[in-house]
Image (cartoon, rainbow, N blue to C red):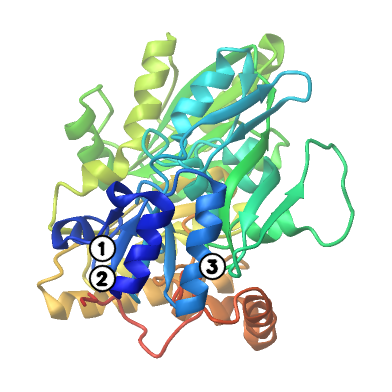
Amino acid sequence: MLANEVKEKLIKIVGLENVEDSHVERLVYSYDATPQFQALPDAVVSPRNTKEVAEIVKICNDYNIPIVPRGSGTNLCAGTCPTEGGIVLLFKHMNSILEIDEENLTVTVQPGVITLDMIRAVEEKGLFYPPDPSSLKISTMGGNINENSGGLRGLKYGVTGDYVLALEVVLANGEVIRTGGKLAKDVAGYDLTRLMVGSEGTLGIVTEATCKLIPKPESKQTMLALYQDIEAAAQTVSSIIASKVIPTTLEFLDQPTLKVVEAHAQIGLPTDVQAVLLIEQDGPCEVVKREMEKMHALCEQGQAISVQIAESEDEAEALRTARRSALSALARLKPTTILEDATVPRSEIANMVKAINEIAEKYELTICTFGHAGDGNLHPTCLTDIRNHEEIERVEKAFAEIFEKAIALGGTITGEHGVGVMKAPYLERKLGEAGMAAMKAIKEALDPNHIMNPGKVFAKDCRKRVVVSR
């Protein structure tokens, strides 16, 4: 628990109602969406503006109190779990869209803004913010920035970091800096904006962000291709990319995922096939028509048994919604659902899917696979039970092999979920000893007292998922 002296100082800054340290309130913010991790914070503090954030951080720095910035807690790498206690910094008051600048095509937001609310606001003005994580209905922009989130449209449009132009950040000593601006070009000094995006709250706390917008595409079409051969579906992904067509969305779902998603969504998804590809393209009408016809032909050449284009936007939206619900649908089957992400070059998708299936069979596990196949980002998802310790041991070994295989194929251990605690044991395998040393040097320079989301990104001795309690 916080010392009374510290608590009184925090109350003076944000008010009594914005400092919560009851057991119930601490319990609510002791975990995120990551299975098997839980740790009680000492308090939950809700600032109302950047000035208050800076003052809170100064106190934490003076007293060596860990501070964990948190949005909606949809994190999947235990990145917002307060594993070392301290303060959870909650942005429920800092949730405004500050500006939509139609002249410069930018939107400026506070970190607590819900992603979908912002997307809808800019689309009302005929503009478009492409990043669309599956949790967009509840995830916050601050969380998206901390994790550099991706989404279904990542293949064509990229990830969150590709749209962040400027940030306001509170550093570990309480100083406030501004990076970037509403600029098409800016090469003045180190790119601190890019450094902060994806840093998972370990280098500073984002209190404001300006993001790039683009014109809203004039048309969009959605297609579903069915396969009885998983490897044929994966090979079709490579064929589409090799044809120099870059669709907006190119998603993969295997049969176990299909069955569960259909039972959950009940929109008529086929469950008697081994895999489906969900494909979308947007842009000028004539371009969309031409490229959808080309991808239709490639799917048929790739052994698809059926290729159908959605007849209405309602039908297309139902397909997108079903895909976004994959995790929540799978979570209904077993007490513990562990969703991971590994990314490989697009040309290696078929090999990666095959490897995941072989690893699942080797360890006698149920692993459903879906994900953003077009950008090589797959989500192998294991359905298990934390109470079965022997099975959890096999789960750990299976995922370790999956990550090793991804790296061997020229890939990485995470494409969008971040490192947090979950992937920390595997990070050095990707970056090497020198790469880790460079990252640690940056951390040490900006946060010498290690108060900013400690215990994340850099591995400790434990290489297993654990439940932490205080």
Residue 63 sits in quarter = bottom left
Percent of width and height locating residue 337: 23, 57
Residue that carries the numbered disc 1 in the rendered image: 30
The secondary element bearing badge 1 is classed as: loop
Verify CB contact (< 8 Å) between mark 1 and mark 3: no
In this view of the protein, which residue sits in the foreground, 43 or 115? 43
Q: Is residue 438 above or below residue 193?
A: below
| Residue 84 shown left or right of residue 243 in the figure | left
The secondary element bearing badge 2 is classed as: loop
The quadrant the N terminus occupies is bottom left
- Disc 1 or disc 3, which is closer to the eye? 3
Q: Residue at x 61, y 40 (%)?
A: 155
Q: Which mark is residue 58?
A: 3
Q: Residue at x 42, y 18 (%)?
A: 316
Percent of width and height locating residue 412: 56, 66
Residue 36 sits in quarter = bottom left
Q: Marks 2 and 1, Cα distance to the nearest angstrom?
A: 5 Å
Residue that carries the numbered disc 2 in the rendered image: 39
Q: Is residue 51 above or below residue 338?
A: above
